Amino acid sequence: MAEEAHTAEEAHTEAAQMGGMPPMLAYTLRAPIQGQTGTALIKIGQGSNVQTLTPNGAKDQSWWFVILDANKPATIVQQVVTQDNKTVPSGFDNYMNNPAYLFAVVTQVLSNGQVPQGPLYAFLTAHGAGRELQKLEQISSYTLPPYGLFARVSYVLTGQGGPGGIAYERSSFSEPAVLELSLMPQMNGQPPYSICDSYTFVH
């Protein structure tokens, strides 16, 4: 299923590059790792049309869970900022299992000891988290917060809701995690949008 989805995505990307479909929207997510360097954010679009989404009630040592409307991707449908690294935010599974939505999980100045545990870890892996999250988990397993080799980590996960949806992730223990993707319309140029592993820029 994943291989078929990637093949379809590659065909869409090739068509876009050949001018066979309308332009995509740049889709960039950033998870700050140091304090006083801004909030977690999502940027959609490029040039003068870019829209920036930030957490409602942003705070350090937190996870930002956000649901976007696939028909109007700069529209936040639901969001939660939490410092709980074990509990799944209430009601989010319903959105993340629905292809009408896009989801993102972005950290903000996260402590090494705040990587997901238990139900939250299982929830994220069920929705596409993999080696990037596992890397942070392993680092956390041999360092004792607040001491150890790395005091802070950063992580981003985003994907398409629904069964078999593609997800992308990025993590770091040394710098902000930045994930640069694109939002791709249907072949007729109309929404809903899907996430595409491609760069989009002004040229």
Image (spheres, rainbow, N blue to C red):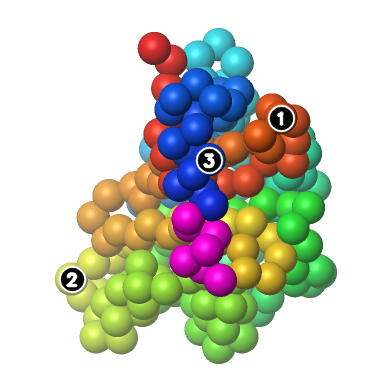
Q: Quadrant of the N terminus?
A: bottom right
Q: Nearer the viewer, residue 69 or 56?
A: 69
Q: Secondary structure at mark 3?
A: helix
Residue shown at the point (23%, 67%) measured from the top left: 150
Q: Nearer the viewer, residue 89 or 148?
A: 89
- Identify residue for label 1: 188
Earlier in the chain: of badge 3 and badge 2, it is 3
Residue 103 belongs to magenta span: no
Circles 3 and 2, Cβ within 8 Å, touching? The answer is no
Circles 1 and 2, Cβ within 8 Å, touching? The answer is no
Cα separation, mark 1 vs mark 2, equals: 50 Å
The amino acid type, in three-letter code, at marker 1 is Asn
Q: Secondary structure at mark 2?
A: loop
Residue shown at the point (23%, 55%) measured from the top left: 174
Cα separation, mark 1 vs mark 3, equals: 11 Å
The amino acid type, in three-letter code, at marker 3 is His
Q: Nearer the viewer, residue 181 or 147?
A: 181
Answer above or below: position of 154 versus 186: below
Cα separation, mark 3 vs mark 2, equals: 43 Å
Q: Which mark is residue 149?
A: 2
Q: Which mark is residue 12?
A: 3
The answer, for residue 85, to whether it is visible in the render is no
Q: Which residues are magenta?
A: 1-7
